[in-house]
C-alpha cells in the first residue's frame, strides 16, 4: 500500500492502545474524557467506516472507489469528465462510445438471428452517460426490429439513476422503466427485478475492473472474477452481457488519464458524513503497475495526521500513501480468462470477439450466461 519506493510505515492506534486499556466496544470515563465521539461497535459501523478501518489497518486496499460518488461526488465526477474527457487525457468515455457505436449492430444482428425479438435491458452502473452508450444499443435494436420492453437501472448513486432513467424514457417512452439502488455485483439483486423476454445486461465504464487488491503484489484475478460472478449470479442462463474495458498497457497514458481526479477523489475525505478531513496537505496520486495491471489511486499524506473513524483514533505518519481504489487494466486475454471462470462464454459476432478499437486500447465484449 505504500507509494513508489518509500519504505515509511504508518502506525494505527486505538484509544485503548493509547491509554493501555483493553476492549474496543465500551467506553470508560477516562476514554470518554479524551474522545469526543463514542466508539461505535464494529457490527454497527457504516460501510464507509468499515472500509476505511480496513484500509488504515492494511487489511484491504483498492476497494473504496464506490464511495467517491456519494454526497455530491457524482457532480464532481461530471465536472472531471467535462474538463478532462478528451482523447489525450481521460480518453475512456470517448473511445468507449465510439466502439459501442461501431459494434452495437453486430450484437443486434446476433439477437435477431437467434429470434430474440423482445428484451429487457439491464444497465448496471449506468452513471450519467446512458444515452451515449446503452443508447447506441437501443437504436441498433430498433433497426433490427427488436423490442426493448423494459429497462432496469442498477447503481449505488441515486443522481446517476435518475439521470439515466430520464435519458432512457426519452429513448424508449413506451417501455417499462425500473430503478434499483444497490450494489451491481450483489447476486441477490436477481430477486429485485423481473425479465420480460430475454435479458440483455450491460456494464460500461469498466466497472467490473474496479477490483480490490494491492497493486504491488499480483494480478487481481480473483477479485475481478468475484465481480463478474456477482453479475452472473443475477442473470438467468442464456442472458446476454455486453461490456467494454480499457486494455491499455501504456503506463504514461494510463496515469495521465486519471491524474486529474484530485478534487473528485479528495471530496471523499472532506465531507462530514465520512471524515471531515482538511486535505490541504494531502495529495492525490496514481501509480500504474504493469506487472499486475492495476492503476492504483492513492492519498499521499505530507504531514502527520490524527483523527477518528467510528470513534477510533487513527494516526498516520507523513510520507504515507494509502491506495484506496483500483482501475484494473487487464489485456483482452486476461479478461477472457476471468469471464470463463465466472460462468460466461463468448458469442460469435461478425468480427472476432472481443472486438478491439483500432488503437488497441478499448475492447467490446459480448458474452452469454452459460
Image: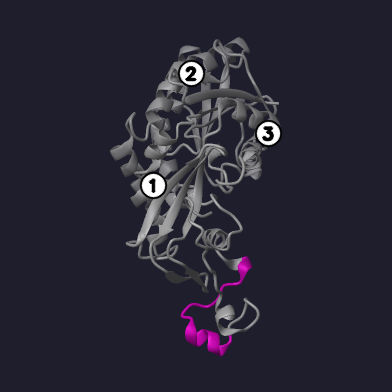
Instruction: Look at the picture and state if 327 lies above or below 94.
Output: below
Residue 327: x %, y % from top left: 50, 41
Magenta segment: does it hold 192?
no
Question: Label 2: how many residues lie within 10 Å, few (<14), some (14-19) or many (20+)?
Answer: many
Instruction: Look at the picture and state if 75 lies above or below 94.
Output: below
Indicate which disc, 1 or 2, sits on the residue closer to the N terminus. 1
Indicate which disc, 2 or 3, sits on the residue closer to the N terminus. 2
Residue receiving disc 1: 74
* Left or right placement of residue 250 versus residue 260 in this view: right
Q: Secondary structure at mark 3?
A: loop
State how far apart marks 3 and 1 are (Cα). 30 Å
Residue 70: x %, y % from top left: 43, 53
Residue at 65% over, 34% down: 232
* Circle nearer the viewer, 2 or 3: 3
For residue 19, the mark is none
Q: Are marks 1 and 2 in contact (CB under 8 Å)?
A: no
Image quarter where the C terminus lies is top right
Residue receiving disc 2: 104
For residue 342, the mark is 3
Question: Label 3: how many residues lie within 10 Å, few (<14), some (14-19) or many (20+)?
Answer: many
- The span picked out in magenta is 28-43
Q: Are marks 3 and 1 in contact (CB under 8 Å)?
A: no
Amino acid at each position: 500500500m505504500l507509494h513508489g519506493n518509500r519504505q515509511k510505515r504508518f502506525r494505527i492506534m486505538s484509544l485503548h492502545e493509547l491509554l493501555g486499556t483493553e476492549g474496543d466496544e465500551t467506553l470508560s470515563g477516562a476514554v470518554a474524557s479524551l474522545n469526543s465521539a463514542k466508539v461505535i461497535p464494529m457490527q454497527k459501523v457504516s460501510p464507509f467506516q468499515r472500509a476505511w478501518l480496513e484500509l488504515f489497518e492494511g487489511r484491504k486496499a483498492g476497494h473504496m472507489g464506490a464511495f467517491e460518488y456519494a454526497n455530491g461526488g457524482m457532480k464532481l465526477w461530471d465536472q472531471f469528465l467535462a474538463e478532462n474527457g478528451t482523447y489525450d487525457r481521460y480518453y475512456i468515455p470517448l473511445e468507449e462510445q465510439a466502439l459501442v457505436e461501431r459494434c452495437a449492430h453486430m450484437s443486434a444482428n446476433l439477437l435477431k438471428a437467434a429470434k430474440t425479438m423482445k428484451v429487457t435491458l439491464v444497465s448496471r452502473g449506468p452513471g450519467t452517460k446512458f444515452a451515449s452508450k446503452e443508447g447506441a444499443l437501443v437504436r441498433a435494436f430498433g433497426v433490427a426490429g427488436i423490442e426493448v420492453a423494459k429497462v432496469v437501472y442498477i447503481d449505488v448513486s441515486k443522481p446517476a439513476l435518475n439521470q439515466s432513467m430520464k435519458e432512457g424514457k426519452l429513448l424508449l417512452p413506451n417501455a417499462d422503466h425500473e430503478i434499483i439502488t444497490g450494489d451491481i455485483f450483489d447476486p441477490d439483486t436477481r430477486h429485485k427485478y423481473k425479465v420480460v423476454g430475454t435479458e440483455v445486461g450491460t456494464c460500461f465504464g469498466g466497472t467490473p475492473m474496479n477490483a480490490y487488491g494491492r497493486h504491488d503484489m499480483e494480478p487481481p484475478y480473483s477479485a475481478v472474477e468475484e465481480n463478474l460472478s456477482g453479475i452472473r449470479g443475477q442473470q438467468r442462463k442464456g442472458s446476454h452481457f455486453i461490456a467494454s474495458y480499457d486494455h491499455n498497457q501504456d503506463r504514461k497514458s494510463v496515469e495521465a488519464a486519471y491524474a486529474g481526479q484530485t478534487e473528485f477523489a479528495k471530496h471523499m475525505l472532506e465531507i462530514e458524513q465520512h471524515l471531515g478531513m482538511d486535505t490541504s496537505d494531502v495529495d492525490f496520486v496514481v501509480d500504474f503497475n504493469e506487472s499486475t495491471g492495476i492503476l492504483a489511486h492513492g492519498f499521499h499524506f505530507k504531514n502527520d495526521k490524527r483523527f477518528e473513524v467510528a470513534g477510533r483514533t487513527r494516526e498516520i505518519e507523513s510520507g504515507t500513501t494509502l491506495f484506496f481504489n483500483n482501475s484494473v487494466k487487464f489485456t483482452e486475454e486476461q479478461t477472457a480468462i476471468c469471464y470463463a471462470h465466472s460462468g460466461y462464454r463468448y458469442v460469435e459476432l461478425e468480427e472476432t470477439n472481443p472486438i478491439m478499437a483500432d488503437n488497441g486500447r478499448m475492447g467490446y465484449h459480448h458474452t452469454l450466461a452459460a
